[in-house]
Image (tube, coloured by chain):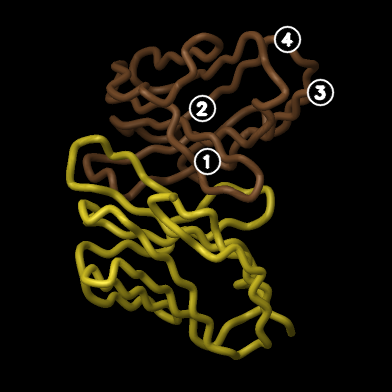
Amino acid sequence: QKEVEQDPGPLSVPEGAIVSLNCTYSNSAFQYFMWYRQYSRKGPELLMYTYSSGNKEDGRFTAQVDKSSKYISLFIRDSQPSDSATYLCAMLGMDSSYKLIFGSGTRLLVRP
Amino acid sequence: EAGVVQSPRYKIIEKKQPVAFWCNPISGHNTLYWYRQNLGQGPELLIRYENEEAVDDSQLPKDRFSAERLKGVDSTLKIQPAELGDSAVYLCAISGERGETQYFGPGTRLLVL
């Protein structure tokens, strides 16, 4: 079993829809939770990170962490075709390793 | 990506050949990482540097992979000899003191034939 599970998709939605992307994890030591966006043939781009449980909002993006359920989400409001990409969740423990553990990514397609 | 330059962007080699990748952080960052991303997967850490020192290389296949970071700035990752299973994207990332904010370069896409 992988430490971080993520549905690979693809997830296809019409422009303007609300998108929900999710990851589950098994390691209760994770304290930092990140979302990266990766366009085809590009490196991952850090979108947001959250420490411990709670919500964080940045423009059209909202990240949620529920540590009791070991479940994290990224919501995208008013989705745009330019949001079409692969979204990777990543997690980090409190030890000094700085080793990000990634999910396998969810492909998102926003149809015009 | 603007903070990390990687070269080459693409490389095609035959198996058993050597190959090297370069990572050039534009601005100074103490911590540098090499990740490998297989098709349809998330990146996996190969090695982490704090300045010139490799502080975590537990995931690096040391029989064929080597890395160095001279003067605590640029870094190279080498594979010798390459195997078919090494085909992947090799990503370099940097961070400051806070490891949760890691910024990635565009990667080098390697194809071993």
Determine the image quadrant of residue B98: top left
Q: Which labelled disc corresponds to residue B113? A: 3
Upstream in the sequence, badge 4 or badge 3?
4
Upstream in the sequence, badge 1 or badge 3?
1
Upstream in the sequence, badge 4 or badge 1?
4
Q: Specify the colour of chain B.
A: brown
Judged left or right of residue B93, residue A13 is: right
Q: Secondary structure at mark 1?
A: loop
Q: List the residue tagged with mark 2.
A: B23
Q: Amino acid at mark 2?
A: Cys
Q: Secondary structure at mark 4?
A: loop
Q: Are marks 1 and 2 in contact (CB under 8 Å)?
A: yes
Q: Secondary structure at mark 2?
A: strand
Upstream in the sequence, badge 1 or badge 2?
2
Q: Are marks 4 and 3 in contact (CB under 8 Å)?
A: no
Q: Amino acid at mark 4?
A: Lys
- Chain of the residue where label 1 is placed in the rendered structure: B
How many residues crowd around disc 4 within 10 Å: few (fewer than 14), some, or many (20 or more)?
some
Q: Are marks 1 and 3 on the same chain?
A: yes
Determine the image quadrant of residue A84: bottom right
In the rendered image, residue A7, in percent from the top left (x then y), is placed at 55, 66
Q: List the residue tagged with mark 4.
A: B16
Q: In 3D space, how far apart are the residues under numbered discs 1 and 3 (Cα atoms)?
A: 25 Å
